[in-house]
């Protein structure tokens, strides 16, 4: 399997090279040259299998010979051993033919653990084999940073710097990033929003002297391996509900478009997905794009679901690549317009294809709070604000009631205790293994939204 850039000007890479490279040198994102497919028999064979076995079978066509079978199975076993549920990503019924896919049983209580724990293990094996070290710089709207810290802390071959928007993450999210004591991980609180943090990461990758000098790598969802790891739970949940014998729909709380793009990949691989529903908060650029075809930035408004407070959804570029028949020059122009003019309008054909694959819905703050309250009243289960947007979208946009609807529960409610308690009167407790989080010493550096200053800091601390 070879990997190509969405902008068409970077060299083709192997899986290992694409994983360790992150962003392509032409500014694009890597994708497989072709979509491998699974037969209906292959998918049916996932029934009753452990999560790690399904992950092996789904991911192996993309990985090729980067890891031999025994090595890859061992990587998967180590990655998912810390999860707090034997099913890793269990499915729980929440209503008539409505189900919640719980993705928060990893060590930092968010869906990012499903991919990040795996990437940490893959990086460690690949770097040890190559005798190399890397510097990872990540931007986070809340969950990616703590998941990366957990996955890479203490590794000799990795220096990790996580940038998060100062004052725009929950206290639990912040403390998960600022309390690790290992010397190779660093939390940077940036004076700006998530889009500023993400722009800084991309600018570092496009500064080739800096990139090559510090051996820069990425673990944001610009890294293809992140998206690939998330494809697996679309298969496990769908098979648990009767696939491939019947179609399944998914409602996905969406910020950077990586999680729902993983659902699109699963569908390309042969999973019988009926509808993919984009659920946004009031930062609704993706919903507006589906509705109007205009992809225009309008600024970021802070919400109770901060991991979705994004206007530049990086992984949407990967979908655009397919919508525009994989024409790199077209994607280059669209991204230039987004950066220079603040937006672009999809071609008629691209918009039609987008609507063939995706529905969308928007959930404001009052609706999010009301959904948290209603869900608790109906099921006795507390849901985080991000998950609540997915539930609200699923109920507003429900299609055929005979088709199972799966809502992705992307974070544990304890990561957002103030919002959950305000809506329900119930304070969601942290799991026992994290009960001392508020007592741990914090270690963080506040930095300006200034590329040169942050690059200097990184070089000084490697």
Image (cartoon, grey):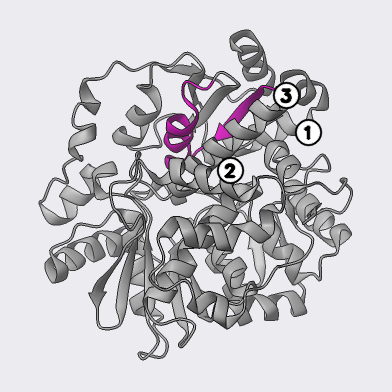
Q: Spatial distance from mark 1 to mark 2, Cα to Cα? A: 33 Å
Secondary structure category for the residue under label 3:
loop
Mark closer to the chain start, 1 or 2: 2
> Which region shows up in magenta?
131-155
What secondary structure is found at the residue carrying circle 2?
helix
The answer to which of marks 3 and 1 sits earlier in the sequence is 1
Q: Residue 71 bears which disc, if any?
A: 2
Q: Residues within 10 Å of mark 1 (few under 14, many from 20)?
A: some
Dot 2: within a 10 Å radius of its alpha carbon, few (fewer than 14), some, or many (20 or more) residues?
few
Residue 279 seen in render: no
Front disc: 3 or 2:
2
Residue at 54%, 57% in the rendered image: 56
The residue that disc 1 covers is: 206
**How much space separates mark 3 and mark 1, taking CA atoms?**
13 Å
Query: Which residue does the numbered mark 3 point to in the structure image?
Result: 215
Within the magenta stretch, is there residue 135?
yes
Which quarter of the rendering shows the C terminus? top right
| Real-space Cα separation, disc 3 to disc 2, in angstroms | 25 Å
Q: What residue is rendered at 51% in x and 26% in y?
A: 191
Query: Could you tell me which secondary element the residue under label 1 belongs to?
Result: helix
From where the camera sits, is residue 64 visible?
A: yes
Instruction: Tell me which label, 3 or 2, sits earlier in the chain.
Output: 2
Residue at image location 76% in from the left, 26% down from the top: 211
- Residue 332 vs 453, above or below: the answer is below
Which of the two marks, 1 or 2, is nearer to us in this view?
A: 2
- In this view of the protein, which residue sits in the foreground, 89 or 219? 89
Q: Residue 10: give x, y in percent of width and height.
A: 87, 46
Residue appearing at x 64%, y 73% in the figure? 268
Q: Nearer the viewer, residue 383 or 119?
A: 119
Rendered image quadrant of residue 330 = bottom right
Closer to the eye: label 3 or 1: 3
């Amino acid at each position: 399997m070879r990997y190509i850039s969405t902008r068409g000007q970077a060299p083709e890479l192997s899986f290992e090279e694409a994983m360790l490279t992150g962003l392509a040198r032409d500014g694009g994102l890597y994708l497989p040259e072709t979509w491998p497919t699974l037969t209906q028999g292959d998918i049916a064979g996932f029934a009753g299998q452990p999560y790690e076995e399904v992950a092996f079978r789904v991911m192996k066509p993309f990985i090729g010979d980067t890891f031999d079978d025994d090595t890859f199975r061992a990587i998967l076993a180590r990655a998912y051993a810390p999860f707090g549920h034997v099913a890793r990503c269990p499915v729980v019924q929440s209503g008539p033919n409505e189900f919640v896919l719980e993705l928060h049983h990893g060590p930092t209580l968010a869906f990012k653990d499903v991919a990040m724990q795996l990437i940490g293990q893959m990086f460690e094996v690949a770097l040890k084999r190559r005798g190399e070290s890397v510097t990872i710089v990540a931007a986070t709207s809340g969950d990616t940073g703590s998941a990366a810290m957990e996955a890479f802390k203490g590794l000799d071959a990795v220096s990790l710097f996580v940038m998060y928007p100062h004052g725009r993450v929950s206290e639990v999210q912040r403390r998960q990033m600022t309390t690790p004591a290992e010397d190779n991980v660093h939390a940077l609180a940036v004076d700006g929003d998530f889009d500023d943090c993400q722009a800084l990461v991309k600018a570092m990758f496009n500064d080739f002297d800096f990139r090559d000098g510090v051996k820069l790598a990425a673990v944001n969802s610009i890294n293809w391996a992140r998206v690939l790891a998330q494809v697996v739970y679309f298969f496990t949940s769908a098979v648990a509900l009767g696939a491939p014998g019947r179609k399944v729909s998914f409602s996905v709380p969406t910020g950077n478009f990586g999680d729902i793009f993983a659902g699109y990949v699963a569908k390309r691989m042969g999973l019988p997905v009926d509808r993919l529903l984009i659920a946004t908060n009031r930062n609704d650029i993706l919903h507006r794009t589906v509705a109007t075809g205009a992809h225009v930035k309008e600024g970021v408004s802070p919400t109770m679901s901060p991991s979705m407070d994004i206007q530049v959804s990086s992984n949407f570029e990967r979908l655009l690549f397919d919508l525009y028949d994989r024409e790199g020059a077209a994607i280059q122009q669209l991204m230039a317009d987004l950066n220079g003019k603040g937006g672009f309008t999809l071609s008629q054909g691209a918009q039609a294809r987008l609507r063939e694959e995706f529905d969308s819905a928007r959930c404001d703050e009052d609706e999010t709070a009301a959904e948290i309250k209603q869900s608790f009243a109906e099921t006795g289960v507390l849901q985080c604000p991000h998950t609540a947007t997915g539930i609200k979208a699923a109920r507003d946009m429900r299609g055929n009631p005979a088709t199972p609807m799966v809502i992705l529960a992307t974070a544990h409610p304890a990561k957002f205790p103030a919002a959950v308690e305000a809506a329900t009167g119930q304070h969601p407790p942290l799991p026992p293994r994290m009960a001392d989080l508020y007592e741990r010493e914090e270690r963080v550096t506040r930095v300006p939204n200034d590329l040169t200053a942050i690059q200097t800091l990184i070089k000084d601390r490697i």
